[in-house]
Amino acid sequence: MIAEQRIIKCRDSMEELDSFFNENNINNAFVVCGSTFDKLPVRRYLESYFGKALTIFSDFSPNPAEEAVFKGLDVFNACNTEFDIIIAVGGGSAMDVAKCTRLRSGKKKPLLVIPTTAGSGSEATQFAVVYRNGEKVSIDDPELLPDIVVVWPDMLKSLPMYQRKSTMLDALCHAVESSWSVHSTGESRKTAMKAIHKVLENKDGYLNNEDSGNAGMLEAAHLAGQAINITRTTAGHAMCYKLTTLYGLAHGHAAALCTASLWKYMEDHLSDCIDSRGEEHLAGVMQDLKNAFGDIGFHGLISELNMERPHPKNDDELDELVNKVNIQRLNNHPIKLSKDVIRKLYKEILEIN
C-alpha cells in the first residue's frame, strides 16, 4: 500500500498517472466502476494502458447491497492474475464497493479512485456504506482510505443535472455537519469552511458544466470529505438514508432536505446543546455557517435548485422513517433530539400538516 494519500491531477496530460503506474510497477488492474464507465474517457485510457491485463467489475447498483461486495470479491479472487492495484471509477457507490473489496480480500493492494461525481467525498474518507437486507451498514476502518486520488474534471462532463445538483448538496451537507459535530476540531472546521466557500465560488460554473467549475467542485468535495473523515456525520445523514431508499431520492438531495430542517430547529433550540463545549460554542459555529453562506443562505440555495420534497402515502411511512434513524449518528449531533422531535422534523420535510 502507498504510505500517504497521493493526489494526481489529470487535465491536458496523463503523464503523471502514467508515471505513477510505471514507477510502482502496476501492470494488472482490477477496476470497480459504475454504469457510466463505458461513456467516459477513463475507459479508453485504462484499456490503452493495461490492455488485456484489465478486469472490470460493475455488477452493483447505487446504494450497493452487501451481496455486491461478495460478488466483486468472488471476481477478484477467481482471476488467475495477481492484481497490482484496485481502481474505483464512479461516485460513492463504486468507491464503497472497491473499498470493501480490498478490505475483505485481506490483500494490501493499492486503492486508486477516480471520482466521476463531486459530492460524496468518499475518496477522502476511511468509511463505506453498504446495505444488508435493505438496512444501511456503515463500515469504518483505516484500510478503507484510498491511497491515490485522481482528480480528472472531464469525468464530470456527462453528469446529469439532477445528479450534479444532488452531489453538490452532499458536499455542502458534509461540510455543514462536520462544522457543528460534537467531534469537530479547529482543523475540521477550517477545512469545512474552505469546502463551503469553494462550493459557492464554483456553483455557477459547475452547474453550467464548465471545466473550471467542475475542477473547483471536485476540490470542494474532497475538502468536505476530509472534514467529515475527522468528525463523522450527524443527524442530517442519520435521517436521510431511509428517505433515499423509501422515495428514490439521490443521497445528497435527501441529506439537504434533512439538514435544512435541522438547521432551523437548532437555531431555535440552542439551549438543548449537548456539546461539551457549550451553547456559546455552538452559537458561534452556527453564526460562522450563516456567514459562510452569505445572502443566499443554505435554505435559499435549496430553493434556487428546485429540489422537490417527497410525499408519503400513509402514516406508516412516517413511522418507518422515525424508527429507522441511526441512533449512533445522533450521538455526534450537538442538539438533543428525541423521537418526537425527529417525527416533527420529518413532517416538515415531507410537508405534512
Image (tube, helix red, strand yellow):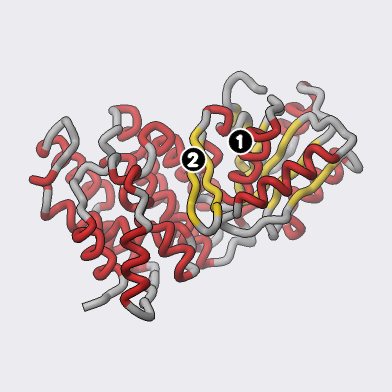
Residue 30 position (above or below residue 277): below
Residue beneath disc 2? 222
**What's the amino acid at mark 1?**
Val
Residue 151 image-quadrant placement: top right
Please give the name of the residue rendered at 72% of the width and 56% of the height, measured from the top-left corner: 59
Q: Nearer the viewer, residue 116 or 59?
A: 59
| Circle 2 SS class | helix
| Circle 1 SS class | strand
Rendered-image quadrant of the C terminus:
bottom left
Q: Which residue is outermost to the top?
A: 3
Q: Is residue 262 left or right of residue 78?
A: left
Please give the name of the residue rendered at 55% of the width and 57% of the height, measured from the top-left corner: 133
Asked if disc 1 and disc 2 are in contact, CB closer than 8 Å, the reply is yes
Residue beneath disc 1? 149
Q: Position of residue 88 (x, y in %)?
A: 67, 43
Q: Position of residue 244 (x, y in %)?
A: 46, 63
